[in-house]
Image (cartoon, rainbow, N blue to C red):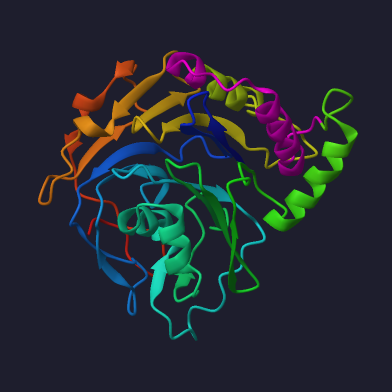
Amino acid sequence: MCTRVLYETGVQTYMVGRTMDWSDMKSGADWWVFPRRMKRDGGAGEGSITWTSKYGSLVVSIYQLASCDGMNEAGLVGNMLYLAESDYGDHATSKKPKLSLGAWLQYVIDNFATVKEAVDALQADSLTVVTASTPNGQAGTAHLAISDPSGDSAILEYIEGKLQIHHSRGYKIMTNSPPYEQQLALNAYWDLVGGQNMLPGTIKAADRFVRASYHLKSSPKFADKRSAVAAILSQMRSISVPIGMDDPAHPNIASTLWRSVLDHEAKRYYFESVLNPAIFWVDLEKLDLKPGAQTMKLKLDGPAILDGDVSALFQPAEPFKFLAPNVPLGSV
């Protein structure tokens, strides 16, 4: 469970807010700095696609198996959220180059500067996404939202083995099930009801989609940067699931573990852990993204209380290996 919102400020710049809702408190969260011109492969074993990154990036990993949230130095943002209905097809019989689900977001922000570039390149559906269960036994299934400094947006989903791309500046909200086309239809109904009269209040993805849409439409477009960040953070907090929430009838409730805000124009990446009493951030311009630079890591759920600008706190680390079946874990 997660929620993603694309917010427009009063000076026509854009920020993305997201919640990471997950049922495993031990899933881990780390920030990674990856330089440009980094040699990559899809992490899915034999037949994996290979590439050299065009752009440096800052990403958050989950389980050190997947890039699930991130921004590149061109300001392109990716947010990967759970989608139970995802169907990537049979990778064993596919003849297309393979890409681990854990590398999907990374592949996009490594190679493209804008949403249009990404959509133009990906719409041919020329890759096979390969997935596996996560360490807590959850199915590895997700869809991907991308956005850029112009406010362009796209939602990418694999349904019945085919890539479906919803591309529009109007696609500002994404949650989880059902697939995006059905989410839009449900939200259209609630638009007619009107949020001032009634809003669906459960933690289900469809209800969160409706509430997030109403909150975004109702929020002022602040020109002041500080107010704009506060606006999008307040929206993400309002849609969050309380930590430790328990319901015997719904044993797989996913509490909100962390929230992020990514500022396209300033290239600043804010982070808020539910276990941490402070907001902290990184400015991409303060990171060494030059070719040949060291990969760097900052642990986000450790005992240290992070606060303010933490751009200087990263330490050298070997990159993680992407989630895939029958591929040994370790560094690459």
Q: Residue at x 58, y 19 (%)?
A: 234
Q: Along the horizontal axis of the image, is 47 left or right of 122? A: left
Whether residue 243 is visible: no
Report the quarter where the C terminus lies: bottom left
**Magenta span covers which residues?**
201-229
The secondary structure that dominates the magenta segment is helix
* Whole-percent x, y for residue 14 in the image: 48, 33
* Left/right of residue 262 with respect to residue 212 in the rendered view: left
Location of residue 26 in the rendering, given as x and y in whole percent from the top left corner: 46, 37
Q: In the image, is residue 19 part of the stretch drawn in magenta? A: no
Identify the residue at horizontal 42%, vertical 57% (top origin).
102
Q: In the image, residue 182 lies at what x, y percent?
A: 76, 55
- Work out which residue is located at the far front of the displayed protein and give it: 11
Q: Is residue 236 above or below residue 175?
A: above
Q: Is residue 163 left or right of residue 107?
A: right
Name the residue: 62% across, 47% down: 171
**Which of the two residues, 41 or 185, is positioned nearer the viewer here?**
185
Residue 232 in view (yes/no): yes
Q: Nearer the viewer, residue 252 or 179?
A: 179
Q: Quadrant of residue 179?
A: bottom right
Please give left or right for residue 178 compared with residue 67 in the image.
Answer: right
Q: Is residue 33 above or below residue 226?
A: below
